[in-house]
Amino acid sequence: MIFAASHFYWAVGGDVGLSVSAGPQLATVRPLWFVLAGLWGVGALCLVGASLAWLLARSRPRGVARRVLKCLGWGVSLVLLARGVAVEFLLLTDVTHLDSSVSAGQRFWTLALWNPWFIVGGLAFGMAALKADRRDPSPSPQTGPR
């Protein structure tokens, strides 16, 4: 929810932190594609992700819905982990020689703040999907229906 709020804040014109997150060029120019996809779109994806996390943690769907929910959870886990690990690797090793396009501030905040959350989020979605996988949606014979 915090990441969604920050993207929506930037989408409506806020600028605190945007230049170190997206770079000074995008923060200053704010092309339409960036505002729509990079700010509003990512904010909306964050809300969808929060909804999926809530469903994984709280709901007890059965049948196909349960399998779809687990697959989505595992998929989000893999995407977040892959993104987090790949960006950490690229920034730490500088194999792509980003010195001219990524400022020291961007590199620092990506490594120290943004990127770890992708990894933590990926692990959290994986654990939630694993828990949903192990959770039995039917009532136990000892407790019966409530």
Image: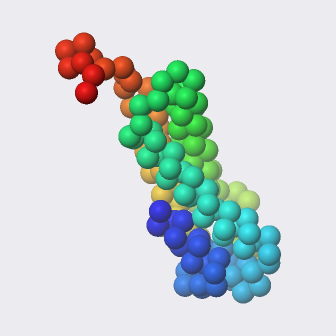
Is residue 105 something one can see in this rendering?
A: no
Q: Quick one: quadrant of the C terminus?
A: top left
Label count reads 0
View extreme (top): residue: 141
Q: Residue furthest front?
A: 146
Q: Is residue 24 above or below residue 136?
A: below
Residue positioned 48% across, 24% down in the render: 62
Q: Horizontal and vertical percent for residue 80?
A: 57, 48
Q: Residue at x 66, y 68 (%)?
A: 40
User: Residue visible at 50% across and 50% down?
Assistant: 51
Query: Residue 29: x percent and y percent?
Result: 77, 84
The x and y percentages for residue 69 are 54, 34
Where residue 52 sits in the image (x, y, percent)?
A: 51, 45
Colouring convention used in this rendered image of the protein: rainbow
In the displayed structure, 38 sits above or below 61; it is below
**Residue occupying the point 52% across, 70% down:** 5
Q: Is residue 144 left or right of residue 55?
A: left
Give the quadrant of residue 141: top left
Residue farthest along the right direction in this orientation: 32
Q: Residue furthest left?
A: 142
| Left or right: 88 in relation to 129 | right
Residue 8 position (above or below residue 114): below
Residue 110 vs residue 35, the one in the foreground: 35
* Residue in the foreground of this view, choosing between 38 and 123: 38
For this view, does 79 lie left or right of residue 139? Answer: right
